[in-house]
Image (tube, rainbow, N blue to C red):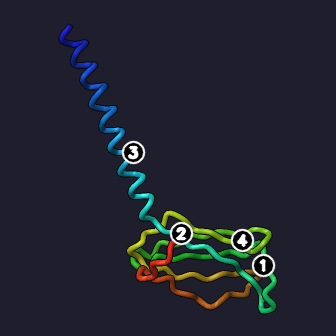
Amino acid sequence: MNVRRRICGLAVLLSLLAAVGGAQDKKREAQLRTVRGVVADKSDSPLSGSVVFLKNVRTNSVRSSYTDDNGNYRFSGLDPNADYELHAEKEGAKSPTRTVSSFDSRKD
């Protein structure tokens, strides 16, 4: 009987820890940022299939993504306390690098 109570108590404890951990994950997710935009040529026509590079200036880690048919790109799950450098490339051409600052508080 003691073993059964301990198992029951452990199951309840694990459930509570999972609930608290899940709430913390949601809070953390809410604090993460998203960068999105459109890659276009000089005449403002969207450029599909461009590669967009996003570099975390603090860690030097780089993420990349292809633009969709409308030239759209999106990076999510970004650290709100880091600055990022962003540029696009297509067929040997490279856009100027832009900086996304951690001080930019605009919401997604």
Q: Which quadrant of the figure contains the C terminus? A: bottom right
**Where is residue 99 drawn, in percent x and y?**
51, 86
Identify the disc placed on residue 15. none
Describe the element under mark 2 as helix, strand or loop. Answer: strand
Above/below status of 46 relative to 32: below
Q: Which quadrant of the figure contains the N terminus? A: top left
The CA distance from mark 3 to mark 2 is 21 Å
First reached walking from the N terminus: tag 1 or tag 2 = 2
Circles 1, 4 touching at the beta carbon (< 8 Å): yes
Q: Classify 10 Å Cα crowding around label 1: few (below 14), some (14-19), many (20 and above).
A: some
Circles 3, 1 touching at the beta carbon (< 8 Å): no
| Residue receiving disc 4 | 67
The CA distance from mark 2 to mark 4 is 15 Å
Quarter-wise, where is residue 2 in the image?
Answer: top left
| Residue receiving disc 3 | 22
Above/below status of 19 relative to 100: above
Q: Classify 10 Å Cα crowding around label 3: few (below 14), some (14-19), many (20 and above).
A: few
The CA distance from mark 3 to mark 1 is 39 Å
Q: Classify 10 Å Cα crowding around label 4: few (below 14), some (14-19), many (20 and above).
A: many
The CA distance from mark 3 to mark 4 is 32 Å
Circles 3, 2 touching at the beta carbon (< 8 Å): no
Identify the disc placed on residue 34. 2
Q: In the image, is 63 to the left or to the right of 30?
A: right
Q: Nearer the viewer, residue 11 or 60?
A: 11
Q: Mark 3 or mark 4: which is in front?
A: 3
Residue at point 34%, 32% (across, down) = 15
First reached walking from the N terminus: tag 3 or tag 1 = 3
Q: Nearer the viewer, residue 50 or 30?
A: 30
Amino acid type indicated by mark 2: Thr
| Residue receiving disc 1 | 47
Amino acid type indicated by mark 4: Thr
